[in-house]
Image (cartoon, rainbow, N blue to C red):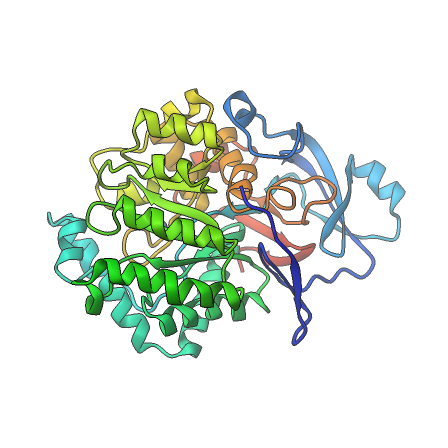
């Protein structure tokens, strides 16, 4: 797990730029009291920090609850009548008898790109494989060509549109990777697009540098030299401009080897960045073991993770982030062993892996449904994986993902009667109201 090194303020617009991410300006003049009679899953019981085993199954539900928001942060929580009496001047927003949860946290997304790849979706469904398409110039390499041709304004507009969609689906914080630029300038442009949108958009972004997403066409015959370029030229610029808080690598048979990945991650650590690994997605190659060895914050995908890899992650405190929508969408024959990880007591998180090729969805509720079906999760376990554990995977475990005093006032009211209905009623958007940093930002799905 990683912690912020220092805070800095972007004086141009008053937005707080923390080393652990971007936080939009928070305004809340007299305090707002959010109240409801329905089930509130507060995730408020027990200590902060990631949850494992039976603790993942405790959503901290209260029947009828209220939180007072001041300056975007929860200042008090309790029974509605108690808080109404204690804070008679607060502005009251009544969420009725709806299910209320913390705003969801998506700890693995690729939101900076241009263009789409629906042609490849159809090719895969007709029998071609992801790796086959990638090796013939499609896949990530196609998105790289499209991003390089798009100007800065287009990239920022795309990021903002994606951010809007995340909010409408109940997600209030995302980890956001670069990785479709794959040149110094285009990777910097991608990360600056995240920074610039984060400066005004309500969604919280935690930026990650993923220059090691693929080998760009012009470096394909000089693979070690590309890793040198990442380490010697790109990482130092990213760190100097404080454009990312973490460094990720696509460690896989057809892309970055274990040795190349290790070299890059150790260099990132030296610069103070947290580390993450796209590990064991398509073939078993020891990515989880590497993540544990370097003390990575998370290892992601893990479809082919070994038993030893899971044990190493548990010992190292590396959070497994599972991406069931990607496995399903790529028609992989195997699922990540979410059920085994649960039994082993790993602090599992779930993410969309939102990207234009292998998972073009921004819906965490859909991912929760898939985790319930494929890994045997309960609704409570799935919710823990997209709140508390997801927040811990991106270094925000002490400020988002729970409805308790001191945490950001990020919450979602769902047009649903109880938590079990959330993964049960899959494929529809049940969001009624989204509150981000104490302000209503989505109402009736808009
Ligand atoms: Zn990914």
Looking at the picture, tell me which residue is in the foreground, 237 or 182.
237
Q: Can residue 322 be seen by looking at this rendering?
A: no
Q: On the rendered structure, is 310 left or right of 258? A: right
The x and y percentages for residue 205 are 53, 58
Looking at the picture, tell me which residue is in the foreground, 70 or 269.
269
Quadrant of the image occupied by residue 309:
top left
Q: Residue at x 35, y 66 (%)?
A: 113
Q: On the rendered structure, is 176 left or right of 198? A: left
Looking at the picture, tell me which residue is in the foreground, 400 or 168.
400
Quadrant of the image occupied by residue 308:
top left
* Screen quadrant of the C terminus: bottom right
Image vertical order of residue 89 relative to residue 312, above or below: below
Image vertical order of residue 298 relative to residue 14, above or below: above
The x and y percentages for residue 277 are 37, 45
Q: On the rendered structure, is 38 left or right of 155? A: right
Quadrant of the image occupied by residue 190:
bottom left
Number of numbered tags placed on the structure image? 0
The x and y percentages for residue 162 are 44, 62
Q: Residue at x 10, y 47 (%)?
A: 127
Q: Residue at x 46, y 39 (%)?
A: 295
Q: Can residue 126 be seen by looking at this rendering?
A: yes
The x and y percentages for residue 171 are 52, 50
Q: Residue at x 31, y 74 (%)?
A: 148
Looking at the picture, tell me which residue is in the foreground, 161 or 112.
112
């Amino acid at each position: 797990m990683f912690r912020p090194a220092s805070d800095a303020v972007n004086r141009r617009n008053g937005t707080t730029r923390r080393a652990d991410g971007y936080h939009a300006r928070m305004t809340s003049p007299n305090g707002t009291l959010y109240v409801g009679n329905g089930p509130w899953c507060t995730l408020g019981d027990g200590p902060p920090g990631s949850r494992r085993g039976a603790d993942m199954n405790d959503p901290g539900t209260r029947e009828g609850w209220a939180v007072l928001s001041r300056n975007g942060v929860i200042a008090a929580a309790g029974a509605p009548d108690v808080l109404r009496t204690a804070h008679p001047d607060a502005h009251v927003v009544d969420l009725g008898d709806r299910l209320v949860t913390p705003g969801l946290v998506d700890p693995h997304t690729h939101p900076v790109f241009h263009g789409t790849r629906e042609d490849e979706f159809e090719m895969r469904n007709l029998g071609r494989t992801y790796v086959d398409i990638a090796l013939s110039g499609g896949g990530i390499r196609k998105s790289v060509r499209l991003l390089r041709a798009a100007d800065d304004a287009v990239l920022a507009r795309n990021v903002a549109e994606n951010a809007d969609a995340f909010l409408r689906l109940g997600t209030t914080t995302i980890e956001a990777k670069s990785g479709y630029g794959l040149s110094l300038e285009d990777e910097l442009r991608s990360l600056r697009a995240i920074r610039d949108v984060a400066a005004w958009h309500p969604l919280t972004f935690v930026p990650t540098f993923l220059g090691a997403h693929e080998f760009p066409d012009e470096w394909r015959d000089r693979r070690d030299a590309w890793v040198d370029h990442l380490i010697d030229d790109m990482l130092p610029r990213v760190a100097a401009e404080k454009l990312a808080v973490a460094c990720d690598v696509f460690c896989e048979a057809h892309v970055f080897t274990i040795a190349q990945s290790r070299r890059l991650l150790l260099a990132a650590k030296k610069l103070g960045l947290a580390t993450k690994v796209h590990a064991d997605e398509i073939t078993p190659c020891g990515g989880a073991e590497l993540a544990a060895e370097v003390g990575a914050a998370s290892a992601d995908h893990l479809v082919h993770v070994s038993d030893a890899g899971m044990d190493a992650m548990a010992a190292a405190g590396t959070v497994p982030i599972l991406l069931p929508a990607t496995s399903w969408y790529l028609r992989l024959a195997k699922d990540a062993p979410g059920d085994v990880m649960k039994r082993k007591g790993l602090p599992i998180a779930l993410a969309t892996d939102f990207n234009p090729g292998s998972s073009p969805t921004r819906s965490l509720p859909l991912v929760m449904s898939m985790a319930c079906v494929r890994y045997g999760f309960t609704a409570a376990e799935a919710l823990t994986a997209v709140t508390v554990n997801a927040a811990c995977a991106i270094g925000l475990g002490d400020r988002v993902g729970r409805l308790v005093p001191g945490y950001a006032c990020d919450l979602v009211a769902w047009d649903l009667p109880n938590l079990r209905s959330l993964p049960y009623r899959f494929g529809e958007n049940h969001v009624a109201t989204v509150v981000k940093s104490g302000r209503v930002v989505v109402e009736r799905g808009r």
